[in-house]
Image (tube, coloured by chain):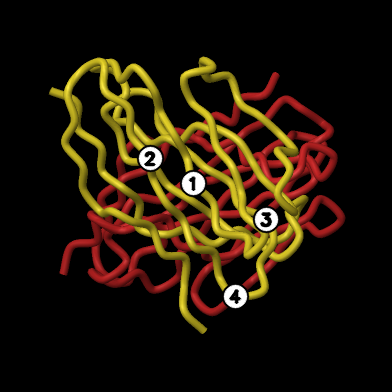
Amino acid sequence: QQQVKQSPQSLIVQKGGIPIINCAYENTAFDYFPWYQQFPGKGPALLIAIRPDVSEKKEGRFTISFNKSAKQFSLHIMDSQPGDSATYFCAASNNNQGGKLIFGQGTELSVKP
Amino acid sequence: KAGVTQTPRYLIKTRGQQVTLSCSPISGHRSVSWYQQTPGQGLQFLFEYFSETQRNKGNFPGRFSGRQFSNSRSEMNVSTLELGDSALYLCASSYGGGNQPQHFGDGTRLSIL
């Protein structure tokens, strides 16, 4: 019940395309859903986060869509660029469990020029 | 503002040894969480410290321990190292823990021979 399932495992898109990464969770106590971007040799960097009282959040080219009834959320990257090539992780946490983030398995995104 | 700093960046140890990793959080952040990242298991939560107290703990053996100092800096210790402890160890800090945004350092790469 603590798992977060992420798909796909890898994704290849052309420059300008809109990659979509999906995550699903079981624990309805989760109340915070961040997305992280990780480049090789670096730690994960916080991209954008959403709470379950909102169905969509946009920051720059990154958009999170959240479906509370389906217990699913997804990341969309608009006008993707080769520099977006990285591994993306979704995560979830419950405020009552302090800073414990439960991560998805990651999606390796490659954006071709 | 300086980011999360982890030292050392790389470590090579042999089985049976112990190791101490260090993390300096972002100035003003009082919560520090530790994660283990491996290709097989992904990102897994180890523990979280807030105001020098362990507030949450993941499912790792007692060989993994940590502490936090009054200046919020944190250390993680692994005793009796095993081959399976080879991983990237990441530290993340946040202002107050809970569902506050967590910011990661670039990690310590630990290799066990």
Q: Which residue is painted at 21% across and 48% down in the image?
A: B10
Q: Are marks 1 and 2 on the same chain?
A: yes
In the image, what residue type sits under mark 2? Thr
In the image, what residue type sits under mark 1? Glu
Marked residue nearer the N-terminal end (1 or 3): 3
Direction from residue B29 to residue A6 in the image, left or right: left
Q: Which mark is residue B27?
A: 4
**Badge 2 is on which residue?**
B20
Q: Position of residue A33 (x, y in %)?
A: 67, 49
> The chain drawn red is chain what?
A
Marked residue nearer the N-terminal end (4 or 1): 4
Read off the chain for label 1: B
Image vertical order of residue B52 relative to residue B38, above or below: below
Q: Which residue is painted at 69% across and 61% down in the image?
A: B30
**Badge 3 is on which residue?**
B31
What secondary structure is marked by label 2? Answer: strand
Q: Residues within 10 Å of mark 1 (few under 14, many from 20)?
A: many
Query: Distance of mark 2 from mark 4, alpha carbons?
Result: 22 Å
Image vertical order of residue B68 relative to residue B24, above or below: above
The reply to whether the C-beta atoms of the residues labelled 1 and 3 are less than 8 Å apart is no
